[in-house]
Image: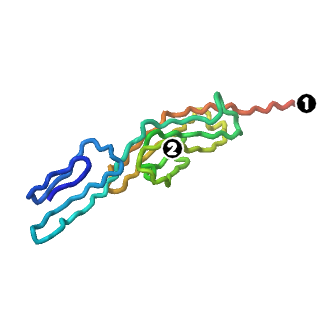
């Protein structure tokens, strides 16, 4: 019995349990398999492939306002953008948008690429005077299922502090 793999293969042994160990795996499409050579009466060994998901947490997660600098004006729409850099596999990525502790929206991805990619997601908001001082942030979460790390690995952007200028209506009173 043994393990065949491009990294961390284990030579044939007579033990009843053989462990495949890799300390730092960077091969995105690795397909290790366990094999057993019965005896001379069997022509081929029994082989079983081990499904492996290699994941990479993002290098960075950042948030900003698209095509805008400075304070926001009450009643105007703004597009927030969250950039997630170098994450894999993207089909397991969920990007969550928060205002303070309130979840506003979340986005999942269908791209089946297993190598690290950059992803961008956007959120449309309408500035309100109640938003002045609010903190927006986005969080990237890798959902790797019940067999993956629990809780799922996450990385959160620094907060975007909203500054909203509100409209004032000055009415003239005739006396």
Against 145, residue 74 (above or below) is above
Ranked by sequence position, the earlier of labels 1 and 2 is 2
Quadrant assignment for the C terminus: top right
Q: Which residue is mark 2?
A: 119
Q: Residue at x 47, y 49 (%)?
A: 94
**Quick one: label 1, few (<14), some, or many (20+) residues within 10 Å?**
few
Where is residue 65, by image quadrant?
A: top right
Q: Position of residue 107 (x, y in %)?
A: 52, 50
**42 or 70: nearer the viewer:** 42
As helix, strand or loop, the secondary structure at mark 2 comes to: strand
Mark number, residue 174: 1
Mark number, residue 106: none
Q: Is residue 86 left or right of residue 39?
A: right
Quadrant assignment for the N terminus: bottom left
Where is residue 121, by image quadrant?
A: top right
Where is residue 168, by image quadrant?
A: top right
**160 or 50: nearer the viewer:** 50
Outermost residue to the top: 70
Q: Position of residue 167 (x, y in %)?
A: 74, 33
Q: Is residue 138 left or right of residue 131?
A: left
Q: Residue at x 24, y 63 (%)?
A: 48
What colouring does the structure picture have? rainbow
Q: Position of residue 134 (x, y in %)?
A: 57, 35
- Mark 1–mark 2 distance (CA, rounded to whole Å): 58 Å
**69 or 7: nearer the viewer:** 7
**Quick one: label 2, few (<14), some, or many (20+) residues within 10 Å?**
some
């Amino acid at each position: 019995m043994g393990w065949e793999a491009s990294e961390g293969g284990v030579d044939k042994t007579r033990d009843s349990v053989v462990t495949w160990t890799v300390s730092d795996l960077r091969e995105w499409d690795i397909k290790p398999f366990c094999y057993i050579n019965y005896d001379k009466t069997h022509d081929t060994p029994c082989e079983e492939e081990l499904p492996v998901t290699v994941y990479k947490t993002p290098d960075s997660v950042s948030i900003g306002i698209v095509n805008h600098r400075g304070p926001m004006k009450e009643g105007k729409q703004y597009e927030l953008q969250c950039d997630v850099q170098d994450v894999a596999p993207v089909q397991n990525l969920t990007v969550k948008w928060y205002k303070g502790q309130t979840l506003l929206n979340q986005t999942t991805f269908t791209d089946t690429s297993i190598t690290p990619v950059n992803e961008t997601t956007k959120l449309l908001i309408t500035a309100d005077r109640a938003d002045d001082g609010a903190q927006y942030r986005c969080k990237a979460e890798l959902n790797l299922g019940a067999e993956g790390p629990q809780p799922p690995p996450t990385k959160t952007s620094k907060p975007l502090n909203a500054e909203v200028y509100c409209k004032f209506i000055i009415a003239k009173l005739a006396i």
